[in-house]
Image (spheres, grey):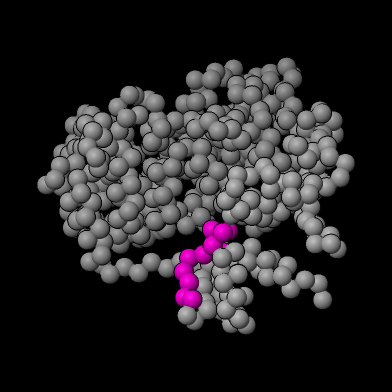
């Protein structure tokens, strides 16, 4: 914001003053990400000094947004009385219930199959394709099975889940024959809309009209029919660009549906017996992924962690750390009084059961080698470490492994300079 109306570029020396001493890694990471997003332009002068400026297109668009200039409709167009005629008047309670029902159907589709539940709920072919494209679920013998990434997904708060699914959606727009610019502008527009307000579809492009159908299936917007001239953003949409946790679902760690759900509901004994005070079908399905359920009452289920149940979870791609993280997140207040929420013997045994399978975890990345001198190797390796992409190194052989190579490549090109 400080750079938005600057007539000249901003010297790097002054930018460093905005960061605390020792925060070089954070500065490099921030400027690199902004450059990748085409928000920040960095130039190097002949005398070696570096300066920064906002990208011309981003600066122009942000000024339009703040000043209310530029194209009309960037923040949605309210529906007229004629467009709203014949439409039922919806309340905030209806929108919340609609969004919650749609989103919980998606979560139950993910965990129900692996939990041994016959998943008959139809979430739509488009949403199923998204879940498979993001490798959140895989199909085995005609039933969806949650993956390691999917288990991480269901443990996140709802707002993070929505964004993760939308990112997969963005990656698929070319395959769907949709315009990327229209998709992005519509998503950011949704984050600026008012909850409960009816908005017109008359200003939307063909791509955005297609998006309405997809987002309606996810509960992000409500539209009474495909031919309706108005749509309503739900709480899942209006919190996209805010720090709010968004809509609370029964599968959300931040759910406020009850005080017990907010504080935790799982008790584990040292004999591996588990008691969960919940009536949420999603939570019961998640627990059954790694626990052998034995009894179920109106507001309580009981079961036991066994070698077979943990092996079953591991075979489906769920790690011991994810199981422990879930149990810790939802630990009952009585368990939280202990130094470690989960008994150490239980945590150790879960890890040992996983190790028995001799699983090997792979991580994609890039091996950097063939450095001319030790000094060059150390310089580039330390830069990768500052950027937070260094995964492994061997100083003796002058090689190291990074999770992302873009920053390191840009740094090497900058050192070589123009030829």
Q: Is residue 37 above or below residue 221?
A: below
Q: Quadrant of residue 412?
A: bottom right
Query: In the image shown, does 165 or 261 lie closer to the viewer?
Result: 261
The number of callouts visible is: 0
Residue 95, position in %: x, y? 53, 25
- Outermost residue on the right side: it is 7
Residue 413 in magenta stretch = no
| Location of the C terminus (image quadrant) | bottom right
Give the left or right position of residue 193, taking residue 330 as reference: right
- The answer to whether any part of residue 143 appears in the image is no
| Location of the N terminus (image quadrant) | top right
Residue 356, position in %: x, y? 22, 66
Residue 227, position in %: x, y? 66, 33
Q: Quadrant of residue 238?
A: top right
Query: In the image shown, does 221 or 35 lie closer to the viewer?
Result: 35
- The answer to whether any part of residue 234 appears in the image is yes
The residue positioned 39% from the left and 50% from the top of the image is 151
Residue 207, position in %: x, y? 71, 45
Residue 392 in magenta stretch = yes
Q: Is residue 224 above or below residue 136?
A: above
The residue positioned 67% from the left and 42% from the top of the image is 18
The residue positioned 26% from the left and 46% from the top of the image is 288
- Outermost residue on the left side: it is 271
The residue positioned 64% from the left and 55% from the top of the image is 28
Region rendered in magenta? 384-395
Query: In the image shown, does 27 or 230 lie closer to the viewer?
Result: 27
């Amino acid at each position: 914001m400080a750079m938005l109306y600057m007539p000249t570029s901003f010297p790097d020396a002054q930018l460093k003053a905005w960061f605390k001493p020792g925060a070089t890694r954070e500065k490099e990471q921030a400027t690199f990400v902004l450059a990748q997003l085409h928000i920040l332009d960095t130039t190097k002068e002949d005398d070696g000094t570096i300066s920064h400026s906002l990208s011309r297109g981003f600066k122009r668009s942000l000024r339009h947004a703040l000043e209310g200039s530029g194209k009309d409709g960037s923040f949605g167009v309210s529906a007229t009385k004629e467009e709203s005629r014949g439409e039922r008047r919806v309340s905030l309670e209806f929108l919340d219930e609609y969004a919650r029902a749609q989103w919980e159907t998606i979560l139950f589709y993910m965990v129900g199959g692996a939990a041994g539940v016959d998943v008959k709920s139809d979430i739509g072919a488009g949403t199923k394709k998204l879940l498979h494209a993001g490798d959140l679920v895989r199909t085995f013998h005609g039933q969806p099975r949650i993956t390691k990434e999917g288990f991480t997904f269901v443990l996140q708060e709802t707002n993070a889940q929505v964004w993760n699914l939308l990112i997969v959606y963005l990656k698929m727009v070319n395959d769907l024959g949709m315009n990327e610019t229209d998709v992005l502008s519509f998503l950011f527009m949704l984050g600026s809309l008012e909850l409960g307000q009816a908005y017109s579809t008359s200003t939307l492009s063909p791509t955005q009209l297609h998006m309405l159908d997809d987002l309606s299936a996810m509960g992000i917007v409500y539209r009474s029919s495909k031919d309706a001239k108005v749509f309503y953003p739900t709480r899942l949409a209006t919190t996209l660009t805010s720090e709010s946790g968004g809509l609370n679902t029964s599968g959300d760690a931040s759910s406020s549906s009850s005080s017990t759900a907010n504080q935790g509901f799982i008790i584990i004994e040292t004999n591996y017996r588990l008691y969960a005070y919940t009536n949420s079908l999603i939570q019961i399905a998640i627990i059954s992924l790694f626990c052998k359920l034995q009894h179920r009452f109106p507001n309580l289920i009981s079961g036991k962690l066994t070698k077979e149940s943990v092996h079953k979870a591991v075979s489906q791609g769920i790690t011991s750390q994810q199981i422990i993280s879930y149990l810790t997140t939802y630990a009952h207040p009585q368990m939280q009084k202990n130094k470690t929420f989960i008994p150490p013997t239980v945590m150790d045994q879960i890890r040992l059961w996983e190790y028995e399978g001799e699983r090997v975890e792979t991580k994609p990345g890039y091996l950097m080698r063939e450095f001319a001198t030790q000094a060059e190797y150390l310089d580039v390796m330390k830069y990768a470490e500052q950027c937070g992409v260094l995964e492994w190194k061997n100083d003796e052989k002058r090689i190291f492994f990074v999770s992302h190579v873009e920053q390191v490549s840009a740094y090497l090109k900058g050192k070589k300079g123009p030829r």
